[in-house]
Image: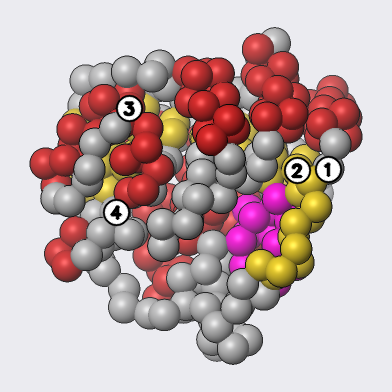
Amino acid sequence: MVITPAIALTIAGSDSGGGAGIQADLKTFAFHGVHGTNAITCVTAQNTIGVTDVVALNSAMVTAQIEAVVGDIGVQAVKTGMLLNENIMEAVLAAAAIGRLPNWVLDPVMVSRTGVQLIDDGAIAFLQKQLIPLAQILTPNRYEAEILSGLTITNLATMEQAAQKIHQLGCGAVLVKGGAMTGTLQGVDVWFDGERLEVLKTECIQTPHTHGTGCTLSAAIAARLALGDAPFQAVNKAKTYVTEALKHSLAIGQGTGPVGHFYPLLS
């Protein structure tokens, strides 16, 4: 039997520990029955304890990977993660400007969920002004949403205000993630698409093994879009998937393990 699957592309960094980045994205695509393709932006040496080294690929190679995929295979949805620097962002912008990145889910990957800034101020400004206006769905965490909105986020009301303000940057929709919030707001997300303001809640899973959660969510949204779901429906299904993956998180290594991307196969 010959199968023609939906195709998704991830443009992101490689995680040698297998819990986040390209590796998490491809596992997530596969779970949803979507063929995953990739353009690697950087290679990291990391494990459950932390990152020990990062090497960026040159922007020409990033462009070559994108063109190799879309020129032959074609894609129905795209997820971007760690873009690392302005040169790589320019390569992504060039592809987006000529329609190479349909159903683009942009995970800004500017600040970790623990509040550590991951890219420099110039790259943040480029992403904000040049990339975000072209994205269909933007998925900032609490700290990224604070940078993009200029607000201090402390409660649900400020999450909602931030989502509405960020939407003014020009993206199709914003999902402000609550993974870094505390108390009853942990894991509560806020959606705004210019008309619909929704608070999205799922079961809060208590586990120390949460590595790759943000990558996995944005990849799952892209997978659902590739399968034809409407944006809001895609986000809800993706949240359900991530919740189940957190329930089956992996206790590997000496630090923070990843979510269980392939949880139905785990005994």
Q: Are the two marked residues, 1 and 2, in contact with CB atoms closer than 8 angstroms?
A: yes
Q: Is 17 part of what is drawn in magenta?
A: yes
Within-10-Å neighbours for mark 3: few <14, some 14–19, many 20+ = many
| Residue drawn where x is 14% and y is 50% of the image | 155
- Residue beneath label 4, please? 178
- Residue beneath label 1, please? 57
| Residue 108, above or below 244 | above
Residue placed farthest to the left in the image? 157
Q: Are the two marked residues, 1 and 4, in contact with CB atoms closer than 8 angstroms?
A: no
Q: Magenta stretch: give its range.
A: 13-25
Q: Are the two marked residues, 4 and 2, in contact with CB atoms closer than 8 angstroms?
A: no
- Residue beneath label 2, please? 41
Dot label at residue 166: 3
Q: Are the two marked residues, 2 and 3, in contact with CB atoms closer than 8 angstroms?
A: no
Instruction: Say what secondary structure mark 1 lies in.
Output: loop
Q: Considering only order in the chain, which callout, 3 or 4, is on the residue closer to the N terminus?
A: 3
Q: Residue 94: which quarter of the image? A: top right
Indicate the amino acid at tag 4.
Gly
Q: Is 101 part of what is drawn in magenta?
A: no
| Residue 30, above or below 218 | below
| Residue 202, above or below 262 | above
Q: Considering only order in the chain, which callout, 3 or 2, is on the residue closer to the N terminus?
A: 2
